[in-house]
Image: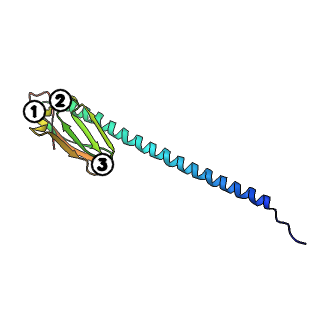
Amino acid sequence: MKKRVDKKGQMKMSFGMIFSIILIVIFIASAFYGMNKIIDLQKKVQISSFLNDFQNDVERMQNTFDGEKPVSYVLPEKIEEICFVDRNENLRINGNKYSDAKNIEGINIEKTLDNKEELCIPNEDGRVNFNLEIVYGETTVTVRE
């Protein structure tokens, strides 16, 4: 006796396998999409935290009489530099595919720039380092490299 091969069963099985593979690919793709969104959100939170912390440090320096304070902030590595400019928004954040500008209250932009067009501080390994300085009798803070 010859065994009879059921071709219909083979077709059903291969369709089920193909459908399973498609589902696996969809799940993996959506997992990568979700992870990228979470990473982007983390970078936005780091930038927002930098702006908030920087503003707080400037306000603390304004409450002192005289002094200089070195500060260091963590930024995403996609940020190339931060620049202080003489415009309405005195802080510009430059990065690969990212740019933003904010106004930091309490900065003496004229003394910070010292007759230059802008003062740019590079982001080195995810950190931006510079000094905040206030002189006795002044109410605004100067940024120094």
> Where residue 122 appears, x then y in whole percent?
23, 47
> Which residue is label 2 attached to?
62
**Along the horizontal axis of the image, is 122 left or right of 36?**
left
Q: How many marks?
A: 3
Quick one: 57 or 6, which is closer to the camera? 6
Q: Residues within 10 Å of mark 3 (few under 14, many from 20)?
A: some
Q: Is residue 131 above or below residue 56?
A: below
> Where residue 123 appears, x then y in whole percent?
26, 47
> Where residue 93 appears, x then y in whole percent?
27, 40
Q: From the image, which quarter does the C terminus lie in?
A: top left
**Along the horizontal axis of the image, is 76 left or right of 122?**
right
- Marks 2 and 1 in Cβ contact (< 8 Å): no
> Which residue is label 1 attached to?
135
Residue drawn at the location 25% of the way across and 36% of the way down: 54
Q: Residues within 10 Å of mark 2 (few under 14, many from 20)?
A: some
Identify the secondary structure beneath mark 1.
loop
Residue drawn at the location 33% of the way across and 45% of the way down: 97
Task: Name which residue type carries label 1.
Answer: Val
**Along the horizontal axis of the image, is 35 left or right of 8?**
left
> Which residue is label 3 attached to?
126
